[in-house]
Amino acid sequence: MMICLLVCLISQATFAQIGTWQTHFNYLNAKDIAIVEGKIYCVTENGFFYFDTTENQAIRLSKIDGFTETKIAKIKYNSATKTLIIAYQSGNIDLLTVNLKGEPLKITNISLLKESSSIQGNKQANHIEVKDKIAYLAFDFGLVVLDVEKQDIRETYQNLGNNGSAINIYKTVFTPDSIYLSTSQGIRGAKFASNINLQFFGNWRTLINRNFSISSFQNGLILASDTGELFTYQNGKYGNYTYLSVKIENVENINSKEYFIETSNSVNVLNADNFKVTKIVDNKIIHPKATQADTQGKFWIADYTNGLLSNINGAYKTFSPVSTDTLYQTRKDSIVIDLDRNRWSRLGDYGGILVESPKKQRQFIYTGVGSGNLPSNTVKTLALDRDGQMWVGTDKGVVVFDSPNAVFGGKNFDAYTPVFERRRLLGNETITSIAVDGGNRKWMGTKNGIFLFNPDGTELVSNFTEKNAPLPTNEISYITAEPKTGEVYIRTTKGMVSYRGTATEGSLTQDENVVKVFPNPVRPDFEGQIGIEGLVENAFVKITDVAGNLVYETRANGGTAVWNGRTLAGGRVETGIYLIFSGNVKGEETLVSRLAVVK
């Protein structure tokens, strides 16, 4: 039993599960945080994670975990309902219910604002405030009242300006009996009571015509100007005053006597008793965007340069996950060398292709019969496949040069156009990238997602978009396939993800010691694909029970075959030991591995 468990752990740790996705976002450009039952949730430009102070580890979150989108504008925790409110830049809202430890439990999506045609323009939340079980989301178009407990938008306040004019709302704060808004027409306030209709502009009055960042202060406000002024405002009168020589970006409450004062490059603490400001001095604080204090009085800062910062252990340090979004930034599809050492260079928009031989011969390839027959002179990507063919992606589809060296043969060297479903292959798409995996399949990136085709482009294997995959956007910039590992890295205009594909390079030998099966053993709760890796190129694979009865058979993609744990008839296999045989092109069959299935 101990040996079996060890094998399982090694298998799961070493091999990523077939068909799974990972995100590779930037976790350093932090811009908002929320303290959730001791967990520190942090938003970056395209990433999302929480730091577990007990386990001392950062846990990445993404669409893979069920979140609706990638680009988050603001987050806010409502402790009364144990719910984290997540407002996306599109207007979409996710409500994340957490357990007593602050760990994610359930995600509920509210898409009303995003889908509303009556609300035009920017739908990105500027600020979220909570009071009891209600959240108030400030937008450029108005104030949205969200019942967090009922998970429903209760009201939308618009045109709250003078004489019912439209105003941008930047922030909301409450005092015991009033609600205040920082707006494009200054500070506006209203009595907060059940008999006051806050949707009516006439119940709001302008306190100050200038625009200030605000925070609540006893029965009044603390105001911060973009010229560095700080003062209190109570009962229509200005009180304590101090001045910073820089623009103040935000004011946030720490406790009844202290406030965070954020500038573009510093975090300061205001003492409300003596109205003195003390700067937090640390060279890691470069571009702070949000700051909060935990129950222990430790500070957490979302810094746009250095990520999630805190002094929880003394000096400030970064608690963000390692950012891997810098992988594969350099494209390798602008200049490609074919099997005859000819150099193929794409020449940018409208420029076509230049091919140069080792003997300094040159050939330009353009549209038109006899000139290469490209569908367009705007060539976006080049890829050499495992058969030596050159695949060319343009803004009007794909063509293939099946004998690249023929461009110097003095005869017709025109490319041919693969046909899929009786049409030119992706003829209406801009092909931004083509990558060839270990099974010689073609991963084609477009502005409308990813198309995975079989080796000759006649069969669509998979189509990945935002709707069925954790892509942050359908606009694909670049794809890199790692033939040996099967990992496919996909860079989009909004960040990078990767997919553990079903194809790798084939092994040179039919060797039991080379083949890896994962997971092994297969546990009762496993629902994914079982990977069989290290096979010879395009091997025939048969799986039998110990009595020799055929259970399943398939063909490898390069050096990897997959099995869904079911029989040829479609039923789940029983508990037991299964034998995996691999056959090469010569018909030689070898037992390459054993697999345990546990129910």
Image (cartoon, helix red, strand yellow):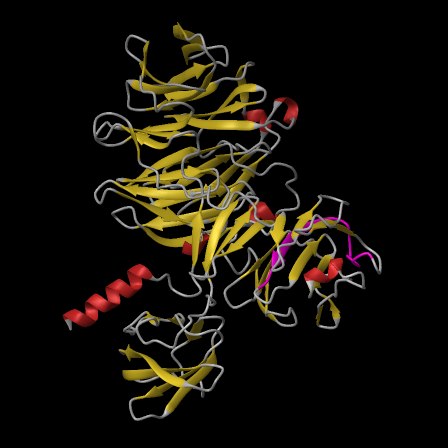
Residue drawn at x 62%, y 48% as measured from the top left? 335
Q: Position of residue 289 (x, y in %)?
A: 43, 27
Looking at the image, is 137 positioned above or below residue 465?
A: above
Is any atom of residue 317 visible in this view?
yes
Residue at left offset 20%, top offset 66%: 6
Q: Which segment is the magenta one?
A: 371-385
Q: Is 314 within the magenta? A: no
Name the main secondary structure of what is drawn in magenta: loop
Quadrant in which residue 210 is drawn: top right
Task: Classify the position of the N terminus by image quarter.
Answer: bottom left
Q: Position of residue 3 (x, y in %)?
A: 17, 70
Q: Front-most of 242 and 221?
A: 242
Q: Is residue 217 visible?
A: no
Q: Where the C terminus falls, by quadrant?
A: bottom left
Q: Residue 255 lies in what quarter of the image? A: top left
Residue 295 position within the rendered picture, expressed as x and y whole percent measured from the top left: 23, 32
Q: Residue furthest right?
A: 369
